[in-house]
Image: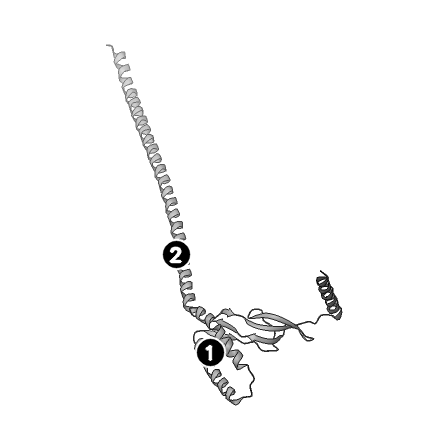
């Protein structure tokens, strides 16, 4: 081998080493890139899993809040029902006492001249006041409209209406007092109220209509 060939071989050695280094670097770079891509996929999968878990957590949170709200509503409803049961426990008993109350009121409204009967009425009134006092201790109160007062549909029931020249819906007569248990009306007060008088023409027309109807019935 001559000097020139040796010189060429010596010049080629650094080039081969450089190529080997480049190939090694490229291989490492490729492997590193593949590793990064693998990690990215793992991170993406983990992020998806985290998102699913978060959604599941939010779903369970919503279910918990709904269940809690339902439980609270049920609890409040049961507490209210329990309070109402206690508050209005005497309602059935009061309803049974209504005829007794009406009987006392009818007796006490009687105008008598006999002294012995008056003494009985004094005793009746004393017993009645004791009964009313006992009922008031349970939250019972009377609705006692007065003649001349304005009719109140919230606490009164108009069982009849009579013609009057004055103002309409004025109490003319009280038939029965009303009874209220706390804020619940057991019975409205029964009253007679006033109404505007009909015109004479209407009265005559109605009278003629009734007479004609009676005649037709008789002929039939």
Residue 128 horizontal/vertical position (percent): 47, 80
Screen quadrant of the N terminus: top left
Where does residue 51 sit, x and y in percent of width and height? 38, 42
Choose between 50 and 66: the one closer to the eye.
Answer: 66
- Taking the spot 35% from the left edge, 34% from the top edge, the residue there is 41
Q: Residue at x 37, y 45 (%)?
A: 56
Using residue 33 as the reference point, say whether residue 220 is left or right of it.
right
Q: Which residue is mark 1?
A: 132
Q: Residue at x 25, y 14 (%)?
A: 6
Extreme left residue here? Answer: 1
The answer to whether 169 appears left or right of 59 in the picture is right
Secondary structure, mark 1, is: helix
Q: Residues within 10 Å of mark 2 (few under 14, many from 20)?
A: few
Image mark count: 2
Which residue is outermost to the bottom?
A: 115
From the viewer's perspective, is residue 130 above or below residue 92?
below
Density class for disc 1 (Cα within 10 Å; few <14, some 14-19, many ≥20) is some
Say which of marks 1 and 2 sits in front. Answer: 1
Foreground residue among 62 and 211: 211
Task: Work out which residue is located at the far right of the displayed protein and give it.
Answer: 201
What residue is disc 2 on?
71
Image x and y of residue 27, in percent: 31, 26
The numbered disc on residue 84 is none
Sooner in the amino-acid sequence: mark 1 or mark 2: 2
Work out whether 109 lies above or below 17: below
Query: In the image, what residue occupies the spot 43% across and 69% down?
Result: 87
Q: Quadrant of residue 80?
A: bottom left
Q: Is residue 197 left or right of residue 111?
A: right
**Cα–Cα span, label 1 and label 2:** 42 Å
């Amino acid at each position: 081998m001559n000097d020139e060939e040796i010189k060429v071989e010596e010049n080629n050695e650094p080039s081969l080493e450089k190529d080997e280094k480049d190939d090694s670097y490229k291989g490492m770079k490729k492997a590193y890139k593949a590793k990064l891509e693998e990690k990215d996929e793992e991170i993406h999968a983990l992020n998806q899993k985290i998102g699913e878990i978060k959604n599941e957590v939010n779903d369970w949170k919503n279910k918990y809040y709904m269940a809690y709200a339902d439980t609270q509503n049920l609890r409040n409803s049961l507490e209210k029902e329990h309070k109402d049961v206690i508050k209005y426990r005497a309602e059935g008993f009061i309803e049974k006492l209504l005829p007794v109350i009406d009987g006392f009121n009818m007796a006490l409204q009687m105008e008598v001249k006999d002294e012995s009967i008056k003494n009985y009425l004094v005793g009746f009134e004393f017993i009645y006041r004791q009964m009313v006092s006992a009922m008031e201790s349970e939250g019972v109160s009377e609705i006692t409209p007065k003649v001349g007062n304005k009719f109140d549909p919230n606490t009164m029931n108009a069982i009849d209406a009579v013609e009057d020249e004055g103002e309409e819906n004025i109490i003319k007569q009280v038939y029965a007092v009303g009874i209220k248990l706390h804020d619940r009306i057991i019975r409205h007060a029964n009253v007679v109220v006033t109404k505007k008088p009909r015109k004479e023409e209407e009265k005559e027309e109605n009278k003629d209509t009734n007479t004609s109807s009676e005649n037709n019935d008789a002929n039939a």
